Image (cartoon, grey):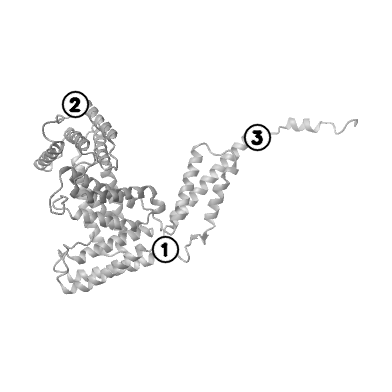
């Protein structure tokens, strides 16, 4: 989370020294994040982490009688824990409780946006559910090593995430196996239409293809679904879409805790897709001027994060995500009752609202993907780890393509593996005098590569033996019977 002018200063003068100290800690964390001249050292992170926990303990003593107090101290503390969490990932401690903090905060945002959007893939929910279980295990393991105040906060936030996740899963609980593929395809199409709508050059042909596919689905399911396909009338596509959303919200509120029938879930989503396709074709990516700056900013963040997902292992330091998180949080928290407002406090039209929400959700989704893809290896060892990952992939491709004809073809791989193995000192990969986190992961990867290369070498040698003609006993006798010289009896 980020600072905001609306966040009030602490009323209790006893909290001012705490605020001063944690502001200083945040500044030092920011400087450490910005320094790309050297690798982040684990001890530097642990020192700042301990200092933050000390301030939290003092704060809790002051607030014994006012647990619900929220002011700038809490905002800056959240900043510090977010940064510490990303630093723990940077140094390879991805399985420890502090590393969970940033991930849980991102998932909470993502779940809120999925619920607000009103449609989501079951795959989204399954992935988040599995990660929440893994993070809960990390918190359990950390009870003897980390601050109980941090662990309590993490457990509370994960409980909120699980509650929202249960609600979203409940909404899809009546989807039958026959309807599931149709529903998943509709979710993909609806997201793809919004993606088309946010491209720099509007892809009219792609949008028309999606629209045609929706009409095919409507024709194929007309005897199965419960809601008739919406017909166009004198209203604009935007008004029809807004009316549809209001109708769905009213029905959801009236149903209470009763999950909708599977056929109705698919019918409603199909109707939304068809109307949204009309909206996208009419708007062709054009956003009203008052929201153009916010739109461009969100699109730029989305595109940068998208590129990072392609180059993550070689170019991303996890603390780089802090800047993106902070920008997104500011935009998200500036909304009023879920609405994006212009400079004069007027809400955006339905099209702009949905497009801005799509870009916001997509950006948080990319951050979530980058966080869960973080390897349990310190950035100091990442160059070695990445080289070994590439070697392993190449060796598997060689194996899957039938192996090699001669062991000589494996020499480049063997030489590279040997050079990496020779970097170890007493079995450890050292960076200066440091022993970075992730030794086990790198060593296991190195052993796997050696095993793959050895297996390919053995196969090549066996293949050569089979290809070489054997010398038989009969041929040996024939060779020995040859005359030694002419005229010799």
Which label's residue is closer to the chain start, 2 or 1?
A: 1
Dividing the image into 4 quarters, which one contains the C terminus? top right
Per the image, the residue denoted by label 1 is 37
Tell me: residue 94, above or below residue 357: below
Tell me: residue 215, above or below residue 440: above
Asked whether the viewer can see residue 96, the reply is: no
Q: Secondary structure at mark 2?
A: loop
Q: CA distance from mark 3 to mark 2?
A: 67 Å
Q: Secondary structure at mark 3?
A: loop
Q: CA distance from mark 1 to mark 3?
A: 56 Å
Mark 3 surroundings within 10 Å by alpha-carbon count, few (fewer than 14), some (14 through 19), many (20 or more): few
Q: Secondary structure at mark 1?
A: loop
Asked whether the viewer can see residue 61, the reply is: yes
Q: Report which quarter residue 4 is drawn in.
A: bottom left
Q: Report which quarter residue 326 is drawn in.
A: bottom left
Which label's residue is closer to the chain start, 3 or 2?
A: 2
Mark 1 surroundings within 10 Å by alpha-carbon count, few (fewer than 14), some (14 through 19), many (20 or more): few
- Nearer the viewer's eye, disc 2 or disc 1? 1
Could you tell me which residue is drawn at 38 percent across and 67 percent down? Answer: 43
Give residue 200's position: percent from left, percent from top: 29, 43
Could you tell me which residue is drawn at 26 percent across and 30 percent down? Answer: 213
Q: CA distance from mark 2 to mark 1?
A: 62 Å
Label drawn at residue 468 = 3
Give residue 402's position: percent from left, percent from top: 52, 36
């Amino acid at each position: 989370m980020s600072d905001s002018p609306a966040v009030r200063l602490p009323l209790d003068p006893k909290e001012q020294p705490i605020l001063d100290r944690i502001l200083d800690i945040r500044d030092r964390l920011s400087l450490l994040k910005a320094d790309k001249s050297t690798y982040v050292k684990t001890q530097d992170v642990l020192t700042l982490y301990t200092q933050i926990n000390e301030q939290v303990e003092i704060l809790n003593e002051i607030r014994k009688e006012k647990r619900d107090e929220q002011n700038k101290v809490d905002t800056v503390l959240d900043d510090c824990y977010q940064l510490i969490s990303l630093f723990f990932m940077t140094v390879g401690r991805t399985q420890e409780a502090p590393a969970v903090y940033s991930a849980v905060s991102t998932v909470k945002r993502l779940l809120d946006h999925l619920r607000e959007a009103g449609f989501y893939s079951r795959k989204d929910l399954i992935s988040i559910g599995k990660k929440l279980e893994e993070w809960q295990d990390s918190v359990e393991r950390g009870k003897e090593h980390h601050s109980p105040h941090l662990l309590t906060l993490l457990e509370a936030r994960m409980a909120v995430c699980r509650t929202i996740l249960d609600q979203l899963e409940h909404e899809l609980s009546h989807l039958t196996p026959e309807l599931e593929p149709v529903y998943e395809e509709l979710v993909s199409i609806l997201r793809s239409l919004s993606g088309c709508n946010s491209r720099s050059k509007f892809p009219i042909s792609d949008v028309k293809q999606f629209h045609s596919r929706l009409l095919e689905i409507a024709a194929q399911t007309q005897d199965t679904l419960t809601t008739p396909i919406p017909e166009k009338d004198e209203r604009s596509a935007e008004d029809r879409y807004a009316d549809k959303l209001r109708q769905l919200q009213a029905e959801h509120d009236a149903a209470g805790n009763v999950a909708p029938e599977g056929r109705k879930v698919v019918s409603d989503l199909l109707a939304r897709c068809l109307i949204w396709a009309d909206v996208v074709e009419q708007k062709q990516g054009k956003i009203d001027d008052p929201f153009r700056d916010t739109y461009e900013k969100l699109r730029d963040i989305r595109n940068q994060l998208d590129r990072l997902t392609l180059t993550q292992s070689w170019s991303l330091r996890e603390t780089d995500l802090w800047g993106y998180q902070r920008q997104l949080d500011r935009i998200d928290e500036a909304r009023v009752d879920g609405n994006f407002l212009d400079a004069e406090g007027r809400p955006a039209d339905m099209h702009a609202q949905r497009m801005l929400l799509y870009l916001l959700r997509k950006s948080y989704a990319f951050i979530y993907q980058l966080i869960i893809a973080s390897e349990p290896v310190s950035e100091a060892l990442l160059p070695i780890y990445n080289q070994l990952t590439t070697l392993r992939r190449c060796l598997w491709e060689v194996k899957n393509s039938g192996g090699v004809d001669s062991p000589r073809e494996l020499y480049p791989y063997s030489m590279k593996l040997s050079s990496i193995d020779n970097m170890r000192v007493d079995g450890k990969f050292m960076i200066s005098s440091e022993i970075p986190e992730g030794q086990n992961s790198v060593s296991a990867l190195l052993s796997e590569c050696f095993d793959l290369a050895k297996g390919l070498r053995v196969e090549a040698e066996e293949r050569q033996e089979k290809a070489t003609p054997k010398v038989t006993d009969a041929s040996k006798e024939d060779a020995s019977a040859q005359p030694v010289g002419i005229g010799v009896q």
